[in-house]
Image: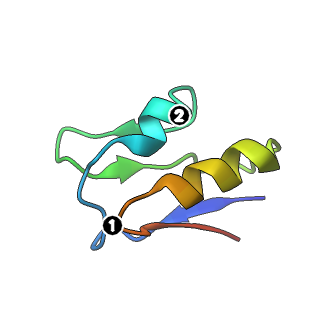
């Protein structure tokens, strides 16, 4: 699974980074930087996607 971020929708709340700090980072510009590689923990990724308050993340 891969995770993609809609950088125009992201407001930098940081829920993704709080839940999975080893995978996500909110950059200096206040926008999420998702991992570029395929990630295997589908349960964690689904939790992160579901926790985004502006629905900026998607699993592909």
Q: Are marks 2 and 1 in contact (CB under 8 Å)?
A: no
Q: Name the residue: 34% across, 41% down.
A: 14
User: Measured from the top left, where is residue 37 in percent x and y?
Assistant: 68, 48
* Vertical order, 30 against 53 (above or below): above
Density class for disc 1 (Cα within 10 Å; few <14, some 14-19, many ≥20) is some
What residue did someone put label 2 on?
Answer: 19
Q: Is residue 40 left or right of residue 59?
A: right
Numbered-mark total: 2
Q: Name the residue: 57% across, 35% down.
A: 23
Q: Name the residue: 30% across, 63% down.
A: 10
Q: Which of marks 2 and 1 is nearer the N terminus?
A: 1
Q: Farthest residue in the left direction?
A: 29
What residue did someone put label 1 on?
Answer: 7
Q: Name the residue: 40% across, 36% down.
A: 25
* Mark 2, secondary structure of its residue: helix
- Kindly report the distance in space between the C-alpha atoms of the residues bearing marks 2 and 1: 19 Å
Viewer-side residue, 55 vs 1:
55
Viewer-side residue, 59 vs 54:
54
User: In the rendered image, which quarter contains the C terminus?
Assistant: bottom right
User: Measured from the top left, where is residue 8 in percent x and y?
Assistant: 27, 73
Q: In this view, does 59 lie to the left or right of 33?
A: right
User: In the rendered image, which quarter contains the N terminus?
Assistant: bottom right
* Mark 1, secondary structure of its residue: loop
Q: Is residue 7 left or right of residue 21?
A: left
Q: Farthest residue in the top direction?
A: 22
Q: Is residue 47 left or right of residue 26?
A: right
User: Measured from the top left, where is residue 59 in percent x and y?
Assistant: 67, 66
Density class for disc 2 (Cα within 10 Å; few <14, some 14-19, many ≥20) is some
**For residue 43, which numbered disc appears in the image?**
none
Q: Quadrant of residue 17?
A: top left
Q: Nearer the viewer, mark 2 or mark 1?
A: 2
User: Measured from the top left, where is residue 4 in percent x and y?
Assistant: 55, 64
């Amino acid at each position: 699974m891969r995770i993609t971020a809609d950088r125009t929708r992201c407001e930098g709340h940081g829920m993704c980074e709080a839940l999975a700090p080893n995978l996500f980072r909110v950059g200096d510009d206040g926008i999420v930087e998702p991992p570029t590689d395929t990630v295997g923990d589908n349960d964690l990724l689904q939790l992160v996607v579901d926790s985004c308050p502006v629905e900026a993340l998607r699993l592909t």
